[in-house]
């Protein structure tokens, strides 16, 4: 293993070089990717639950005859935005396959 490197740079105020902190080796990529994927899966689960709940709320509101059309429209718009976020996260979780 190589010794840590010392980076020299000039400060804006003084013209003399100053030693910076040694560079830390990067974290292992698989560990970082696993944690990131786990966070994405957790967020995906939360978004899916919210999407399903909104679907139930929209169904209940539409069953009542005098319903607020504006409120229904806003709920549907929120549901669509959630669906877009869910699709984006799902595509990030799937590995890129080069054919």
Image (spheres, rainbow, N blue to C red):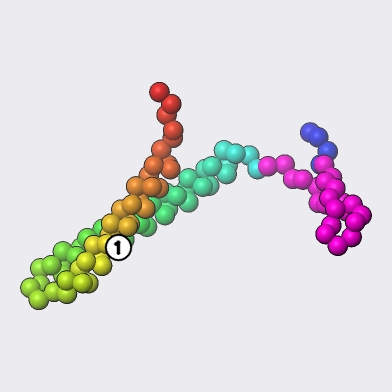
x, y percent for residue 11: 84, 57
Residue situated in front as seen by the camera: 31 or 15 = 15
x, y percent for residue 88: 38, 47
Residue shown at 34%/47% (left/top)? 87
Asked if 13 appears above or below 89 in the picture, the reply is below
Asked if 97 appears above or below 86 in the picture, the reply is above
x, y percent for residue 93: 42, 42
Regarding mark 1 in the picture, which secondary structure is present there?
A: helix
Tag count in the figure?
1
Residue situated in front as seen by the camera: 68 or 29 = 68
Residue shown at 30%/53% (left/top)? 83
Instruction: Write the start and end of the magenta stretch as one range.
Output: 5-26
Instruction: Name the image quarter holding the N terminus.
Output: top right
Residue 57 visible, this orientation: no
Residue 12 picture quarter? bottom right
Asked if 47 appears above or below 38 in the picture, the reply is below
Mark 1 = which residue? 78
Drawn side of residue 69 relative to residue 6, left or right: left
Give the residue furthest to the left: 65
Instruction: Name the image quarter holding the C terminus.
Output: top left
Magenta segment, prevailing SS (helix, strand or loop):
loop
């Amino acid at each position: 293993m190589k010794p840590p490197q010392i980076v020299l740079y000039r400060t804006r105020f003084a013209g003399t070089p100053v030693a910076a902190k040694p560079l830390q080796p990067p974290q292992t990529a698989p560990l970082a990717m696993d944690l990131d994927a786990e966070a994405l899966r957790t967020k995906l689960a939360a978004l899916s639950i919210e999407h399903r709940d909104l679907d139930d709320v929209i169904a209940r509101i539409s069953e009542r005859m005098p319903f607020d059309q504006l409120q229904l429209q806003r709920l549907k718009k929120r549901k669509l935005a959630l669906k877009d976020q869910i699709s984006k996260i799902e595509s990030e979780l799937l590995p890129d396959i080069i054919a």
